[in-house]
Structures are given as structure tokens and as C-alpha cells.
Amino acid sequence: MIETNREFRLFWLERALKNLNALKGWTVNEEDTKRLIIEPLLAWIGYDVWEPGYVREQYPVPKKGGQSADYALMKLGDDTPYAIVEAKSLTRNPHEDLDQIIEYCNFTGARFGIITNGERWILLDEHWKGKPARDRIIFEVKLEDDLDKRKGYEALLLLNPENERILDDFCDSIKKLCESGIKNLEKHKITELVDALEKIEIPTSEEKPRVPAESKETEVVGGEEGGEWPKDLSVLMGKRPPDYVLIDGVKYETRSWASVVVVVAEWLAKRGEIKEPIKSKKLFIINDRPEQVTKMRNPGSHIKPLTNAKGFYVWTHGSASACLERCFKLLEHFGYTPGHAYLKPPADWKS
């Protein structure tokens, strides 16, 4: 796949969104839509669009009289496409061509079909046999959509083959919802989508945690009481953390949301609280081994050893809201209730 450097991936996301906003209202043909929006977004997802082993353009579709799909997304060493992408011009409604993308998947062997005009992305599952194309939609996102406080483009990361198992589970959940005849189906789809995204790594511009061997702490001068976190933590999506946090009136330097989890865990460990693993749902917040119950590849980069509790490790992966919720749960687990009262941002920090 493409280089994993976060800044490199973000460069292509920012370029695609910038181009999209600049082209709105223009008459944009399909080729320009592909070059200026779709291909940068494929790079954001994690595909190297310049490497034929991963992305093949004008992929021939057997039994379709010389027709070809715009892109075939490949898994290294596999001759069958992982997904077929059909591009349309920015002004075209992608719903008009759902049957086409299902046919392309059927004849190429790809399970997933993606049809997009650059702004709207529709993901379909060819494995849902016996259903019309419109009923095989796994999700549909618009890049500017605020899907439960997540931008639509984050959903595209599920298309990275490294997230295949998570996407499979997500597809199974959506299929069950569709078959159940549940009301407010789209609302439930968004809930399932947000849950799926919590399980994958979202590239951000945040620095990787750089917590020193012993976290820096300084007494707060002037009796500063600190500020408050927003009631709805999801508004912190994409926001940088404060330069420091206050834990029970003491200042601790932070450089990322992940480092906030580390300093809270170290604070508790220093007080002799951490003596056994602590689990929240299926995930270990604190574990006595460098392991995690997750389908994420290479989870070890998100498992940090605790300096103040030898032999214990803290799980740091997650969005801003997930990291803070984890901190609150840790504090409240040991009786520091409510956890919000012990962990605060600076008084002048604005979310």
C-alpha cells in the first residue's frame, strides 16, 4: 500500500477537498474529476495510484463487449480485484449507474463496487445476491456530510484492504439491519459506521505521543482551576489537544490525545492504583502484557508501557473523544468520581 506517513496521506486528502470546493459550480468532465478528486482520495485511503500492483486503470470487464472499469483496486499478489471503482463527472448523480457497477463486480469477481462522482461515494456489496442494486448499498457518503460528527471521507478508509475484517463485519451488520425491516435504517447505518471507524486508525495531523520517561508536572500557579470539556466530546473530532491538562490541580504536558491517556494512566500508576488489567467492553485500557483484542493490524504501535507501573501497558488508539472517555473511565474505576472533575483542560483552552 501507499507510504504510511500521516502527513503524506493528509496531503492528498487536503488536496482532494480543496479541489472539490474549487470545482463546485463548474462543468467538470469525468477525467478531471478522476485526476483532481478521486485519485487523491484513493491515495488518502491508502492505495498507491501510481503502482500497477495496487491500482489498475481501465480494467477490462469480461463479457461486456470491450467495456472497462475506471479502476480496479487490488490486493498484492491477488489477480482478482478487491473492489471496482467507477468514476462519474462531478455533476452526475451516481445513483443512475448502480446496476452498471454491480455488473462490473459480477464479471470481474470483485466483491465491492464503488461508484463516485468525487463528492458522493456509494459502496455496494455484490455478495448480496438476489437483491436489486439499490438494496446492496452498504453506505453512501458525501464528503461534507457530518456523520455523527465524523466527516464523510473517514468512511472511505474502510476500503483499505488492511481493514478487510472490519469491513466484512460492518457489511454483515448492515445486511442484518436491512433484512430486519428496522425503522430509521439510515440512522442505524450511521451508528454501525461510527462503531466500525472506532476500530481503525484514522490518519491525523497529531504528533505521535512523545511522553518522556517521567511525565513532566508542575504546580499550578495562582490556584488555576482549569476549564471544562465540551458536553458532547464528539465535537473534538480533528481538534488538537491542549498543550497541557490538569489532573487534580497539577499540570501535565501533552502533545496528542493519545498522550493524555498515557499521563492519566501514569498519574494513577504513581499512586499505586494500577495492580491488574482493566477492561472496557472488549478492549483492555490497561493490560499486563503488550497485547490487545482487536482486528487492527499492528496494534503494538498503540500499546505503551507504563513507567510508574512496571509490566503494565496502556492502550492509546482512538479519536479525541475515545481517548478522553477512556481517561474518565480509568479515573472513575479507581473512585475519582466524576473523572471530569479530576481531568481538565486549561481555563483558556477552546475546543
Image (tube, rainbow, N blue to C red):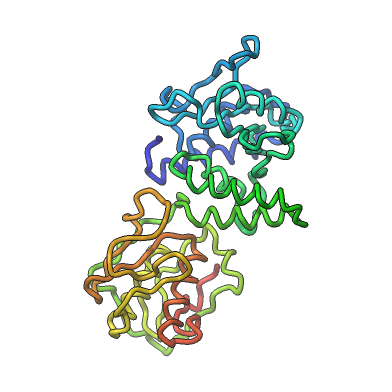
* x and y, in percent, of residue 188 in the image: 68, 56
**Whole-percent x and y of residue 29?**
68, 23
Residue 284 quadrant: bottom left
Residue 326 drawn above or below residue 113:
below
User: Is residue 261 positioned above or below 199 on the image?
Assistant: below
Residue ranking furthest to the front: 130
Residue 143 as seen in the image, left or right of residue 236? right
Most extreme residue toward the top, as rendered? 65
Point 65% across, 14% down: residue: 64
Residue 214 x %, y %:
24, 73
Residue 33 is situated, as x and y percent measured from the top left of the image, at 63, 28
Residue for point 43% across, 81% down: 333
Number of disc labels: 0
Q: Which residue occupies 48% across, 55% down?
A: 199
In the displayed structure, does residue 207 sit left or right of residue 320? left
In screen coordinates, is 237 left or right of 86?
A: left
The answer to which of 44 and 228 lies nearer the viewer is 44
Res. 330 image quadrant: bottom left
Measuring 46% from the left and 29% from the top, which residue is drawn there?
A: 74
- Left or right: residue 119 compared with residue 272: right
Give the position of the C terminus as an image quadrant: bottom right
**Which quadrant of the figure contains the N terminus?**
top left
